[in-house]
Image (cartoon, rainbow, N blue to C red):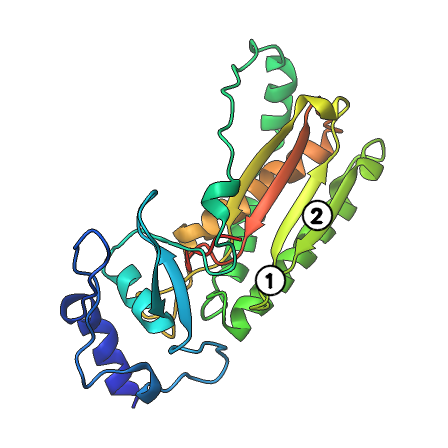
Amino acid sequence: MRNFLLATAIAAPAVLGLVVPNGQEILNPPKAVHADILDVPEGFSVDLSAKRLVQFAPGEPAVWMTELDKITAKAAGKKFFDITDVQDLEESVREMSFKHFPPISSQDKVKEVIKTLSTDGPRAHLEKFTSFRTRYYRSETGRQSQEWLLATIQSVTAKSAAPSIKDSITISEFPHSWGQNSIIVRINGSEPSEGTVIISAHQDSTNMWPFLPAPGADDDGSGTVTILESYRALIAAGFTPKETVEFHWYSAEEGKISC
């Protein structure tokens, strides 16, 4: 069975195709390959036959497909959003007004913070983060990696945050049904009505076939540990922003899920 799964993973992008509303062929599984005959390895919570609502382009009708179809479309390089849980997403998104950046005014403060940045923390964190076999959002190791990341963020905050700003920092999880939660760290601004600045990375990883190893050092382990180091340096310097600043570590980016 393992050889069959591997062969399917390698062949899938070339042999599978599905017709979407614009006539583009994406997925049309051969009769011999169906979700109900593929074994899901232990440590993964994936129903390959589950129906998902997927949108391939703005303004186009969404189409229903199986989780296996979706995995195959991604492996073939197709761009889409899984909107199963937020089917009114397009209607609820409002156009954002363009905001001009203010003149640069804090060079001296920034230079002092930059001096405190180090590659030691990111290197150690990345070595640990990539030691999880995969950070696929529907896997047990994906959940474990998120728990490790949350604990690391909490530890960095406790050890590094200047006493003057500790009370302005909150760390929370944004829960997801698949178990690997997103993480949000918030530094309250002195003038929160000015808006919120978001600095983000995605914590999950995947291979073309999600049951294969996916250490994800550069997609997006490097982004995850880099913004964590930026966060550490800022809070150690007693950073008090005018606008509220949030650091986000997203789950399920590789699943293209809108939530």
- Within 10 Å of disc 2 (Cα), the crowding (few <14, some 14-19, many 20+) is some
Q: Front-most of 220 and 182? A: 182
Q: Residue at x 46, y 48 (%)?
A: 222
Q: Is residue 179 visible?
A: yes
Disc number for residue 46:
none
Placement of 139 over or under 35, stated as above or below = above
Residue matched to label 1: 176
Q: Quadrant of the rendered structure where residue 207 is?
A: bottom left
Q: Residue at x 46, y 60 (%)?
A: 84
Disc number for residue 156:
2
Placement of 197 over or under 68, stated as above or below = above
Q: Is residue 119 visible?
A: no
Q: Can you give x and y, in whole percent of width and height, for residue 52 in the image?
A: 41, 66
- Within 10 Å of disc 1 (Cα), the crowding (few <14, some 14-19, many 20+) is few
Chain-order first, disc 1 or disc 2: 2
Q: Can you give x and y, in whole percent of width and height, for residue 4 in the image?
A: 24, 86
CA separation in Å, label 1 and label 2? 24 Å
Q: Can you give x and y, in whole percent of width and height, for residue 44 in the image?
A: 48, 78
Q: Residue at x 53, y 71 (%)?
A: 141
Q: Can you give x and y, in whole percent of width and height, for residue 118 in the image?
A: 57, 38
Left or right of residue 171, residue 248 in this image: left
Placement of 36 over or under 196, stated as above or below = below
Q: Front-most of 38 and 132? A: 38
Which residue type carries mark 1? His
Q: Residue at x 42, y 75 (%)?
A: 50
Q: Front-most of 106 and 184? A: 184
Which residue type carries mark 2? Val
Q: Quadrant of the rendered structure where residue 210 is?
A: bottom left
**Dot 2: what SS?**
helix
Placement of 23 over or under 196, stated as above or below = below
Left or right of residue 244, residue 127 in this image: left
